[in-house]
Amino acid sequence: MKPVIALVGRPNVGKSTLFNRMTKSRDAIVADFAGLTRDRHYGNGHIGRREFIVIDTGGFEPDAVDGNIFHEMAKQTRQAVAEADVVIFVVDARAGVSSQDHDIANYLRRLGKPCVLAANKAEGMREGVQLVEFFELGLGEVHGVSAAHGQGIRDLLELALETL
Ligand code: GDP
Ligand code: MG
């Protein structure tokens, strides 16, 4: 069985961009508008010969939304996390910690599923200095990555797979 990795995080942090990097595909549609990604959720990826499945979250089919986008996104996150062996929790290195990040972090801590914290959009940032605030999420070390520039992705994947 291939391990399953779920990407979770609030809208617009770069989950779909990261999904595309991890799967080397353009299957997930990257939106410039928060919450409007209509993505396909599953993709195949590999590092070396190690294969995995990755789940993107935060997209929705327009006719599946009963008027409450946030309700739908929370449901998707729960479903993806339930299916996953390990979670990559994506936050926005440039935006800093938000209350939504805290809500998701609390949920993930309660579940106790293996989780790796990734601060995306960290291109050009000094990890040790500028990302320390993310420690307050209580999920341990934060790993700076740039999905858009392809930086830190391989290390992130190796860390995620090492938790298994
Ligand atoms: P999602 O809502 O979490 O799936 O986020 P998306 O992948 O749709 O990306 C949201 C926005 O962030 C888009 O405008 C992306 O181009 C941008 N973005 C994604 N990754 C990076 C990154 O590594 N650096 C920067 N600067 N922007 C990024
Ligand atoms: Mg998306």
Image (cartoon, rainbow, N blue to C red):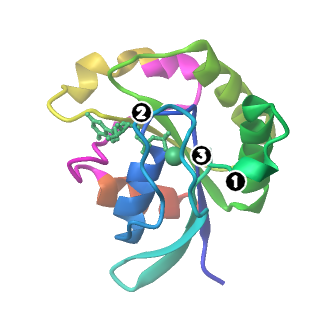
Circle 2 residue: 142
> What is the C-alpha distance between the residues marked 2 and 1?
32 Å
Circle 3 residue: 115
Circle 2: is it few (<14), some (14-19), or many (20+) Cα within 10 Å? many
Amino acid under disc 2: Val
Residue 71 percent coordinates (x, y): 80, 33
Q: In this view, which residue lies farthest toward the front? A: 63
- Verify CB contact (< 8 Å) between mark 3 and mark 1: no
Amino acid under disc 3: Cys
Task: Decide if ligand 1 comes within 8 Å of the CB at mark 2.
Answer: no
Task: Decide if ligand 2 comes within 8 Å of the CB at mark 1.
Answer: no
Residue depth check, mark 2 versus mark 1: number of the one nearer the observer: 1
Where's the C terminus, which quadrant?
Answer: bottom right
Residue 107 percent coordinates (x, y): 75, 31
Residue 40 circle label: none
* Above-or-below relation of 132 to 49: above
Q: For the magenta stretch, what is the residue range?
A: 134-152
Q: Could you tell me which secondary element the residue under label 3 belongs to? A: strand
